[in-house]
Image: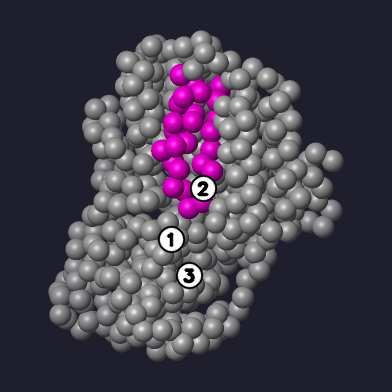
Amino acid sequence: MKLVIAQMKHETNTYSPVPTPLARFAVGGVPLEGASAVAAVRGTGSAFAAFIELAEAAGAEYTVAIAASAWPSGPVHDDAFEHICGRICAAVALGCDGVLLDLHGAMVTQSLEDGEGALLRRIRAIAPTVPIGVALDMHTNLYDAMGANCSVIAGYQTYPHVDMHGTGLRAGRALIALLQGRAQPTMACGRQAMLPHVMRQGTDDSPNKEVQARCKQMEAEGALCASVFVGFPNADIHDAGLSAVVVTDGDEAKARRWRDELLQMAWDARAGFVYQTEPLADSLARARQLVDARPAGAGPVVLLDHSDNCASGGTMDTMTVLGAMLDAGFCNAAAFAIYDPVAVQQLAAAGVGATVTLPLGGKLDMPSLGLKGQPRTVTGCVKLLTDGVYRNIGPMSAGDLNSMGLTAVLDVGGVQVVVISDHVEPHDLAAFTAVGIAPQRLSVLMLKSRVHWRAGLRSLAHAVVECNGTGVCTSDYTALAFKHLRRPIYPLDENARSTLS
Ligand SMILES: [Zn+2]
């Protein structure tokens, strides 16, 4: 058995001004291929690593075409997409029995709304009968071309995504069973007329907790893979939103029945996927009360700047929430992080121990929201400089190597502001260890994150206050102009109806 294994992951925020060239898909330079890609991912918590483990356990010969994964940002540059697709298609063209792909499922390029569908179509054109197994992120925006051009799809069933590896196992086992003649996967895919808010998608909470539990139950009852994709709404494309895919062993009617059950279940729970924002001043006042009443020895009150999370395509340089935090006079506090490579260079030039006054953040305009970047001038002491490289300890993306680039910690009146040169989302304790901050010792911790921070940090928090700041991953749909999204859709339109009705 000969397999081609590859990774192509990007969640595209079409409102984001952050560019997505090929270099964003690699830690330093171009994406890895072949043996160096295998060495980089082996033992990590990715679907990609699971594919390699399964191939080796099955005694298969395998080729790793490319390992390409980028933090979310604006549309992928066409030449980057062509490079990644080209490497995968070239490997398939050499001949193989099966293909295993670790994809995101929400890639938009400068020219295409559905990057994954385009990739799968190209592979099918080269090798029309070769089975293809695909692992997808729960934030997939599912297009028909994806389901029509592969054999098996499995999606994450957790958010924060702590089951990426397990998802690779689910997709990979079903595909290998097909290749070994032990199963005949048949797949039913469908969308629902819903655009769930990201802040209401976490699987610790209802309704997604129950929806994903039903997917797991279906797999226990015989489905090869059952997945509900809550979708990524900060993408103005036709098919953004919720979808479901069920794969059974040869039972087409059951696959369709289970798919419809999942789509109906999500529709019935639709009100629970709607997020109501709170005025920032109210959030800060609540945070003040929580901080003042915090028992001795308790962890920090987390201020969650959920409008500007780089893991949803945010610039990570808006200063609204950090500014409010500084104005509120919180101390024994930290903020992770502000993306500002220019400021980092200034802080590095000044050196550790120097007191510096500089405009921080706000370097990137957000034309999709009609906003100009708004830096805030701060004065602080440079506490630390580092190359910003760290390895996750988990539970999400355990073992992955991350780089925040040259990084500085600037102490602004008792708030340790982490200033970074490359995007990373704070979901792993190792990010803090790398900059000498022990979050459990703080009174207040500002995080630019939405749901993933829960993976590695929630257990440390005394309380969380969700702060409605500024940014292109806002959960306030009224701030986003949807021009290409299919309508009607819930909750944007009162006349939205279930696709099953
Ligand atoms: Zn996701």
Indicate which disc residue 260 carries.
none
> Is there any visible trace of residue 237 in the rendered image?
no
Q: Secondary structure at mark 2?
A: loop
> Which residue in the structure is indicated by mark 3?
304
User: What is the quadrant of the N terminus in the image?
Assistant: top left
Q: Could you tell whether 178 is left or right of 439 in the image? A: right
Q: Secondary structure at mark 3?
A: strand
Q: Could you tell whether 357 is left or right of 493 in the image? A: left
Q: Residue at x 37, y 25 (%)?
A: 54
**Labels 3 and 1 touching (C-beta < 8 A):** yes
State which region is magenta. Answer: 150-176
Within the image, what quadrant is residue 481 found in? Answer: bottom right
User: What is the quadrant of the C terminus in the image?
Assistant: top right
> Which residue in the structure is indicated by mark 1?
453
Q: Residue at x 53, y 33 (%)?
A: 154
Q: Amino acid at mark 1?
A: Trp
Q: Residue at x 49, y 40 (%)?
A: 104
